Image (tube, helix red, strand yellow):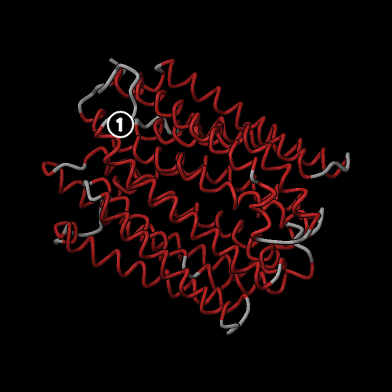
Amino acid sequence: MNREGKLFTKKYNDIFIPLIIEQIFLTLIGNFNVFLFSLFNDQMVATIGISDRLLTIFAMVTNVVVLGASILIIQNADESRIEYVKSIFKESIFLNLFIAGLIIIAVFAFNRDLLILMQTPSELVEEASAYIKIVSISIVFTAMTSLMLATLRAFGFVKIAVRISVANTILVIIANSIIVLAKLGGISYIAIATLFTRLISMLITFITIKKKIPILFAGGKIKNIRLKKEILSLGIPSAMEQISYNFSQTIITAIIASLGTIAVSSMIYTTTITSFIFSIGVAAGVTGNLIIGDLYRNKDYEGIKNFGVLNAKKISLIAGAINLIVAIFGKYLVRIFTDNPQIISIVTVLLFLQIFHDPMRVSNEILINSLNVVKDVRYPVIVGISTTYLLVIPLAYLFVTKLGLDLKFIWLVFILDESTRRFLFTRRFKSGDWEEKENPN
């Protein structure tokens, strides 16, 4: 481990560069999706945006298994431990299928109630309900794909996992482009295309991992109750931080929805334009996971501490510089998506506020990933839930519902939240309390 303050070593770059290419590509494709939907109308953008917020929460529940399994696989991705990894992989498949099945049943039963609870504008409820029901079926496909891609990365097949991820996304964009540009149909057709492309993506990923790591599928039975518990004991706290964050975003979206369709569209366009910046944090977080996994197997706890803080610090500085450039050209970028003067005015202001928000969020993504790998999974959850329900939601409700303030005050709440989290996570990593959990003696 380099202890001289240098982050971008050859080992880091060999992992980070393919991942950042993947993440930026995926983000640009996602932005292109929003652009496609905006060609239809701003109402489609708002409908799919609200629906996807809700679907993200459900996807996070299946992520409990993916995260728990990923931690264990990263820590044990070695030929000498292949039987244990094989058991982890098979138990995770079973748990994924079971949990995804329960979620799909719940979505079909309660989707309209949830949309109304989110204060979805009445003109959007019908189409949003149809979209959510169809796309929810694909949750099982995305959960399985995520598990298999995480396993490929843990075994060193980072570039192959990137190629698969990019190919999968191209499938989605081709299908959506055909539907929107050929005017074959509306939101329901987009949902059907999403469902089938995600199924194809899962099959492509399955064929690849079976070819590259065939031993994972060789023999064995799914009967290890202890391992199921271990996966869930790591996955539940790890996923709870993400679930708490996304649930708070869903509630915030409901509060913003009370301001009208223009406010919802402005939020979506702002996050769309800056989403590729957060993708840098995701790539750095996954890179950190794999490097810390190696350090963990060698019990280099001081190396883990130094690397985790350095990774968060330098990547957040890069994110801030990119945010500044985006904000300067923001009024031109937003015109790619809409010509509504109200939306353009709102988004331009929000992009400048993102300069203070995104670097904090990027740093938190990296630090949370690092803490999870060393099994300090509860601390991020405690911090996340505390700031969400004691700070973010109460202040957002106060500003919008009681004081009648506009969208930029919601962004100020986001900045305060992410800044508080970064301070606490950085202090945790520097304190070495997580090291005591791994090396109490």
What residue sits 33% from the left and 23% below the top?
A: 6
Q: Position of residue 196 (x, y in %)?
A: 44, 75
Instruction: Tell me if mark 1 has few (under 14), some (14-19) or many (20+) residues whose alpha carbon lies within 10 angstroms of its own.
Output: many
- Viewer-proximal residue among 229 and 204: 204
Q: Provide the residue designation for mark 1.
A: 292
| 170 or 214, nearer to the observer | 170
Which residue, as the protein is rendered here, is positioned at the far right?
Answer: 403
Q: Nearer the viewer, residue 330 or 343?
A: 330
For image coordinates 54% across by 62% down, the residue present is 32
Relative depth, front residue between 184 and 296: 184
Q: Residue at x 61, y 27 (%)?
A: 419
Q: Secondary structure at mark 1?
A: helix
Toward which corner of the image does residue 219 lie, by quadrant? bottom left
Find residue 108 and report its image quarter.
Answer: bottom right
Question: On the rendered image, what quadrant is the C terminus found in?
Answer: top left
Looking at this view, name the residue that lies furthest to the left: 80
Q: Position of residue 62 (x, y in %)?
A: 45, 55
Above or below for 291 versus 49:
above
Image x and y of residue 2, in percent: 27, 21
- Residue 15 in the image: above or below residue 94: above
Give the position of the N terminus as an image quadrant.
Answer: top left
Q: Quadrant of residue 91?
A: bottom left
In the image: residue 403, left or right of residue 372? right
With 238 as the anchor, is 83 left or right in this view? left
Q: Residue 173: horizontal and vertical position, in percent?
A: 47, 69
